[in-house]
């Protein structure tokens, strides 16, 4: 007798799909490109763990930015699987007894994901952190509208700071740099993670800016400077400054912040804008308070994001490196 019943719908992506999606999602941004995540695929679900060996103990003692980074990768993973036809259901902090276990994802087929999701997935490979001066973005109101739709489900609020905020943030940046100039632990950590080339982690020299370039931005984090150059030489920074703020300062809120940040950065890239996340000014209580005072509502500033446009004739910057997939993903089929 012939079995005419429909074949069961496969409810888990196959191995090559898992590898391809995870390789793409590994392009997620992270603080100092630390990539502080570990993933386990057990044949049914995909489990996300924080990797505290990659915690920046001086810069980020509470692990806030570590968790935000993990949240950014979580969103990249969900977006990459969506583009491959897989809807993901996420449980955040699934085991209250394991603080390193941040999320588990389960799968359902999703033959036609929305156009916006696919556009954000195809932006993953093109997104870069751009620390050079930027032109003011055009079409900002549409971007803000879409950005708010993307971050609201994460209980985050997105605000645009007005022009009067820039000099205040520049002063706060200078203050943060002055406080840390002689902080040996901070400086050792910064130099460990940044300014080297050829490593699979950290921020390579090529992604950093020279002193002259930095001076035309003013609101950036001070990294070891790149050799003298004057890229975008005539341009002063006119990037707009967006703030992502949360209602709480909890691990769950940080995870959602990373997810919202990822959605926003990918949406900006898809719309043709360049971006740079900034957290040096949300690390210090005084500058955090300053930013909170600029918001038209109560909230805890988590990340400031510069958004602008790159001159038309410019070539795409090289991508920053990533750790090999075997270092971040373990597959265990039962
Ligand atoms: C939580 C978080 C904090 C970050 N803070 C800063 C920052 O203060 N300044 C900066 O220039 N980049 C910052 N970045 C960007 C990272 O340095 C960048 O994502 C990483 O080096 C990888 O490079 P890519 O974004 O070009 O792929 C941050 C990213 C994240 C996710």
Image (tube, helix red, strand yellow):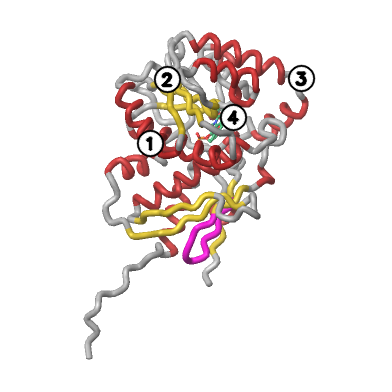
Tag shown at residue 150: 1
Q: Residue furthest bottom?
A: 1
Q: Ligand 1 sits in which quadrant?
A: top right
Quick check: is 85 in the magenta stretch? no
Callout 3: helix, strand or loop? loop
Separation of residues labelled 4 and 1 (CA atoms): 33 Å
Tag shown at residue 205: 4
Give the residue drawn at x 62%, y 21%: 222
Q: Quadrant of residue 182?
A: top right
The disc, 3 or 4, on the residue closer to the chain's N-terminal end is 3
Separation of residues labelled 4 and 2 (CA atoms): 30 Å
Callout 1: helix, strand or loop? helix
The answer to whether residue 198 of the structure is visible from this angle is no
Separation of residues labelled 2 and 3 (CA atoms): 33 Å
Give the residue drawn at x 35%, y 26%: 144
Callout 2: helix, strand or loop? strand
The disc, 2 or 3, on the residue closer to the chain's N-terminal end is 2
Can you tell which of label 3 and label 4 is closer to the viewer?
3
Can you tell which of label 2 and label 3 is closer to the viewer?
2
What is the magenta range? 38-47
Across and down, in percent, residue 329 comes to 55, 56
| Residue with the mark numbered 3 | 182
Callout 4: helix, strand or loop? helix
């Amino acid at each position: 007798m012939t079995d005419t019943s429909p074949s069961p719908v496969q409810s888990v992506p196959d191995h090559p799909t898992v590898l391809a999606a995870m390789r793409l999602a590994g392009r997620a941004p992270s603080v100092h490109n630390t990539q502080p995540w570990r993933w386990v695929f057990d044949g049914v679900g995909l489990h996300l763990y924080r990797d505290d060996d990659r915690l920046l103990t001086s810069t980020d003692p509470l692990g806030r930015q570590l968790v935000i980074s993990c949240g950014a990768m979580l969103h990249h993973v969900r977006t990459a699987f969506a583009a491959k036809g897989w809807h993901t259901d996420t449980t955040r902090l699934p085991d209250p007894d394991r603080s390193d276990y941040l999320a588990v994802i389960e799968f359902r087929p999703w033959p036609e994901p929305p156009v916006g999701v696919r556009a954000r997935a195809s932006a993953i490979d093109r997104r870069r952190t751009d620390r050079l001066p930027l032109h003011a973005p055009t079409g900002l109101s549409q971007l803000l509208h879409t950005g708010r739709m993307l971050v609201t489900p994460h209980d985050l609020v997105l605000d645009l700071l007005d022009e009067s905020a820039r000099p205040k943030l520049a002063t706060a940046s200078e203050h943060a740099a002055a406080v840390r100039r002689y902080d040996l632990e901070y400086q050792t950590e910064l130099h460990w993670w940044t300014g080297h080339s050829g490593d699979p982690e950290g921020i390579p020299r090529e992604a950093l800016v020279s002193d002259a370039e930095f001076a035309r931005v003013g609101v950036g984090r001070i990294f070891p400077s790149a050799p003298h150059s004057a890229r975008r030489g005539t341009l002063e920074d006119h990037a707009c400054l967006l703030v992502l703020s949360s209602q709480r300062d909890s691990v769950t809120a940080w995870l959602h912040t990373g997810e919202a940040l990822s959605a926003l950065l990918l949406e900006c890239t898809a719309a043709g804008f360049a971006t740079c996340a900034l957290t040096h000014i949300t690390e210090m209580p005084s500058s955090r308070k300053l930013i909170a005072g600029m918001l038209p509502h109560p909230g805890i500033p988590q990340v400031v994001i510069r958004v602008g446009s790159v001159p038309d004739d410019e070539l795409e910057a090289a991508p920053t490196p990533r750790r090999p997939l075997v270092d971040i993903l373990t597959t265990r089929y039962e």
